[in-house]
Amino acid sequence: MQIQLPYSGLQWSDIPFLLTGIYHTLLLTVITVVLGTLLGIFIGWARESSKYPRIMFGPLIDVVRSIPLIIQFILVNSFFAMAGFPASPLVIGGVVLSIYMGVLTSELVRAGLRSVRPELKKASRSLGLTYWQELFHVSGPLAFRAVFPGWVGTVIGVTKDTALVSVVGYVELLRASQILINRSNEALLVLAGTGLFYFIICYPISRYSRSLEKVLKHD
Amino acid sequence: MFGYTFYWSIVWEKVPELLQGAKATLELTVISMIIGTLIALLLSLLRRQSSGIGMRFAASWIELARNTPALFQIYMIYFGLGALGLHLSSYVAMLIALSFNNAGFLAEIFRGGLQTIPKQQYIAARSLGIGSFKAYTHVVFPQLFRVVYFPYINQLNWALLNSSLGMIIGLRELTGATQAAQSESFRTFEFFIIAAVIYYAMSKIIQAGARFSFWRLVRE
């Protein structure tokens, strides 16, 4: 019979546990990036093109950017509980981070749309393009070039911010590694591995974004 | 739905504790920004060199700070150094981690700003017989100020928000104090709404103050 001591060292069987953590981190990142980008494009476009959405979404953007994410997670979590629909940590994380990413993206989209010269828009409208045709074939592609590097930066930010969802009980990579540290007492080894994972994801993306910025500037 | 009764009086009693936490938050933010700025100035100068140990050291610091979660950096200082036998209090650990993070982000801001200042400014200063150190402090940095001012304030705001991570390692800054205060009554929502309002106010005051002082400084 084998007896497990409370402090047992790292074992091979811990790897699936960490892999699950990585899976949870990536899952939340992908959900957030997809929903956040769609939301950001919508809010950015709406705020740029008419007056009421500009006023309506203003406070949301202001508040989301001035309150720590941790508090946003806790508030939304207890709000769902109060409303009588306790939601899973993944849902809480997905909702809060998507709104957060949407807000950051919407500001980029707005700046991108504003960077398109009005003469170009007028020229394409006078050529007989409808509003939507102009948006999709002229303004959109031009704005995309201005928005893309900043958007990549936001994706990196959100990847790192998934680590904070642990405050409402989501066991992503960093939380998983902390649990492992508590059990095995191998803080440095586990943390180094965890840091390496985030770095491997984020560093190439940030390099890519920087080189892209240079290329776009020289064009 | 919403069979919930808000219960505020218990929160009002604890407001002094929260304000005490807010004071710790501000203190952490300001000190970590000052340390971060000093290190960042050095890092951005080192990073501009084309090779050498200094440049590589600066590059690794900047990339590590920017490409890993702030919470990871805090864990590394708090648990990682602890494993090496260096046990820091959560306040000191938080201060070191935040300074490390700020230095990395600020160095990138300063580097971008330095690129907008022509190299000839430095060369001209040197040719007038000004030493290297003074050429930076008296000629280059004052010009840098205007360019990096708003990105700098933005980073100050991030530092304020990032300091909330102290809660996770048991620090009683605003978020930690709120967490502790609500644990007696479990009125989580009420307590954290107040904390959110305090954070919002601090963030707005920083931004308004920054805009006002920029207007004052540039006008003169």
Image (cartoon, coloured by chain):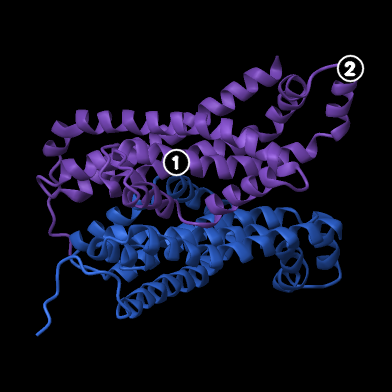
Chain colours: A blue, B purple
Output the chain of dot 1: B
Whether residue A43 is visible to the viewer of this picture, yes or no, is no
Secondary element type, mark 1? helix
At x 57%, y 30%, the residue is B38
Whether residue B85 is visible to the viewer of this picture, yes or no, is yes
Nearest to the eye among marks 2 and 1: give it: 2
The residue that label 2 is drawn on is B128
The residue that label 1 is drawn on is B98
At x 12%, y 82%, the residue is A2
Q: List x then y, in percent, for residue B68.
A: 49, 57
Which amino acid type corresponds to the residue marked 2 in the rendered image?
Answer: Leu
| Picture quarter with the C terminus of chain A | bottom right
- Badge 1 crowding class, 10 Å Cα cut-off, few under 14, some 14 to 19, many 20 or more, is many
Which amino acid type corresponds to the residue marked 1 in the rendered image?
Answer: Leu
- Badge 2 crowding class, 10 Å Cα cut-off, few under 14, some 14 to 19, many 20 or more, is few
Q: List x then y, in percent, for residue B46.
A: 69, 40
In-front residue for pair A9/A181: A9
**Answer yes or no: do the residues labelled 2 and 1 have beta carbons within 8 Å?**
no
Left-right relation of B158 to B14:
right
Q: List x then y, in percent, for residue A16.
A: 34, 80
Secondary element type, mark 2? loop
